[in-house]
Every structure is written in structure tokens, then in C-alpha cells.
Amino acid sequence: MAEHDTPQDTSHDLAPPSLDAAPWLARPETLRVFAALSGETGATRAVGGALRDALLGLPVADVDFATTIAPEEVIARARKAGLKAIPTGLAHGTVTLVADGVSFEVTTLRHDVETFGRHATVSFTEDWAEDAARRDFTLNALYAGMDGTLFDPLGGYPDLMAGRVRFIGDPAMRIKEDYLRILRFFRFNAWYGRGAFDAAGLSACVRARAGLRQLSAERVASEVKRLLVAPQASEAVSVLFNYGLLCDILGAAPKLSRFARLIGIEDALDRKPHAILRLAALAVFVPEDAKRLARRFKLSNAEQALLALGGVPFVDALPDEAAAKRKLYALGPTAYAARVLLAWANGDAPVTDPAWRSAATLAERWDAPVFSLRGTDITALGKFSGPEIGDMLSRVEQLWIEGGFAEDREGLLALAKALAADGGS
């Protein structure tokens, strides 16, 4: 074993544990990748996010690998073992392997020869410490072999356990390599940080904030959405605002109080956070705000529709349950819940308010009924055709809604017949 292969604990006071009992490491598909890349030469280790989350006791989704094996040899070994191999980024040493339907990114150890933002010229290496030194944060520069032994060449484990998000090496250089790392610094603090942000990293982000303008809308939006649903989202957003970055990112002034209130309401309801809903609370006050943000972040149609709810008043006053049911029926459960939460966050009612809680949880207690009449039911009456059919359906539905959705299908048919007898009025 080479000298740089030796497991290290650079903190000298917090030894990294073994991950030999980690469930993700024992998954058949993970073991198939390790087995496929094993051999007399080369070494392969899991790297980054899977280790970080496992050490924090969080669920592990994607597993990435680092290897000393050249990309072409990775492909050859994988295919020999019956795995699908896709050369997704050979110039940067990345191959995607598919085992039992699960995708894994495998990247050959590398160091940057020359950088042009995120487009770097790289050279492959067999030095694990050199590969670690080109990554963004120390807590992401963790490696583990198939037996679970943790390799920590840069002291990432102590930082992770202490909640320190710290750039590797010179923060300014790391950021210059890819300005998205500014947003990643805040996102990782929102997810894993505890206490004050690393001063050197924060200062470097503020000084380099003009570089955010070079990033694509899609990359910025992806980071922002992931930050907004993090456990410490409110704290990270406040720091972004206090240091002058948030207005540049959003293109407008935010409303931190409504954002923080929405988070408190979600916590009180034990409601899973939604990034677009939180973005609406943070930055949408009139319909034009939603349109601008949708263009700025290139949001999907579904995201745009949800975001736009932030600029539409829900009610002047909290409705009674009958009125709330009519709104739920008209809006659908997703839009209704979003409108209630945003209206609640926009006011000053406490997060424990029973009336607002009742309105917000209505969709969990009441399934809106389905209007069961169809055009054929109206034509069967023999008096209506063309646009008149739609008009009759609308009239019957409106009576049904105003009556508290009481009538079943037979009752609706009776309403339709009564209207028809009166000439449809």
C-alpha cells in the first residue's frame, strides 16, 4: 500500500469510524460495482455524499466512486462483469455504471492542470490526497473502501461532526474554479452547518459574488431550490441577505419574515417543505414577481403555477369550513394547501392557531367529491345541444356546490331535470 493510501486522521483528536455496518455499503448493486472494479491493479472507493450522509445518520441515496483505474479500463472491467457502462464524461474521467437498474458515477482520480471556471483540463493520478485537494469542501473529501474503512486525507470528518463547512485550500481559488461553489457553500451550511459560517469561506463568497452572473439559470435554480428546503434554510437565507447576495440571486428584495413564518408553520404541522412554495413566500408578492422569477430560474409549468399562488390573496378573512370546502373543491388539494399556508404566513396568527390549522389540514380530513354528471346526461334530457350542454352542467354544478355537495348522482340528475323543466334557468 502506498504512503498516500494510509488511512489518516488529520485532526489528531477525532478518529474517523468504520462504515462497515452501513446499509448502503451492503446493497447488492453497490457490491457489484466494487467487485467489477476489483483486480490485481487499481483501487476503488466510495466518495463524497454517501459517506457524509451515512456518518450523520441520514438516508443515503446516490453512491459515487473514485478509482485509480483509467476510464477505459473502468468500462472494460464493468462490461466484463455484466454491468452497463456509459462514458458520460471521459475527458474528466467519469463513467456511469448501471448495476441492477441503479446508476453509479465512477471517476478516475485527477488533479486540475488548468481551470476555466467549471471547464477544467485534468490529469489522472493515483494519489488520493491530490484528488481530495481538488474537491470543494473538506466534508466532501471522504473515501471508504468496500470493507468500510474511512480515508480522510484532509480532516473532513472532524469538520463534518462539528458542522463546519470549510473550503479545501484557498477559498478564493476553489470558488474561481466554479462560481456555483458560492451557492453550494450556503446550501451545505443550510444542510450540515452548525453555528457561525466559516469566516474565510464567507468572505471569499462575498468578494466573488459577481461571478454568480456567469452561471446558467438552471444551475442557480437547482442550488436555490435545494437550499430552501434544508433544515437551516432560514439561517442561510438570512446570511445571504445580510451580506448582499440574496437580492442579486432573486433579482428583487425578499420578505424574510414571511419566509421564516412559513417554515415555522410547516414545522408546527409536521409538513414536508416544498422549495417552490418557500420561494413564493420569500419573493412573490404580486403576480409579476412570479413571472419574473419563473423566467429568471427557467421553472417548469407546474412550478410556475405553484409560484404564482404567492401573488394571489387567499381570503380577506379566514373562511368557515363550508367556504373552505368550496375553495378546496375549486382549487384542488395542492393549490388550496399552498394558498392557505401562504396566507397564514402573510398574517400574524400564531403557528398554533387552531382555526388556521383546521383550514390548512382540511384536505387531509375531507376528500372533495367528484361532480358525476356528464354531457351525455344533459343530452339525454332531450332539450339541449352544443354550448347549452356546458351551460347546464355549470348551473347544476354551482347549485351542488352551494348546497354543500349534498346530492349524489341521482340527486344531481333530479336537479338537472328540474332546471330543464324551467327552461334551463
Image (cartoon, helix red, strand yellow):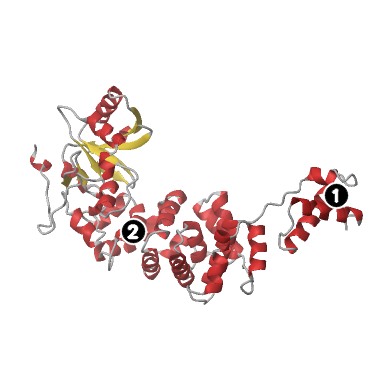
Q: Is residue 289 visible?
A: no
C-alpha separation, residue under disc 2 versus residue under disc 1? 57 Å
Residue 234 on image: x %, y %:
40, 67
For the residue pair 267 and 401, the one nearer the viewer reads as 401
Q: What residue sits right under mark 2 in the picture? A: 191
- Identify which amino acid the numbered label 2 is placed on: Trp
In this view, the residue farthest toward the top is 80
Q: Is residue 369 visible?
A: yes
For the residue pair 29 and 412, the one nearer the viewer reads as 412
Q: Residue at x 81, y 45 (%)?
A: 377
Q: What residue sits right under mark 1 in the picture? A: 388
Q: Residue at x 18, y 34 (%)?
A: 43
Numbered mark located on residue 11 in the image: none
Quadrant of the drawing holding the N terminus: top left
For the residue pair 118 and 23, the one nearer the viewer reads as 23
| SS class, disc 2 | helix
Which of the two discs, 2 and 1, labels the residue nearer the N terminus? Answer: 2
Looking at the image, is mark 2 or mark 1 nearer the viewer? 1
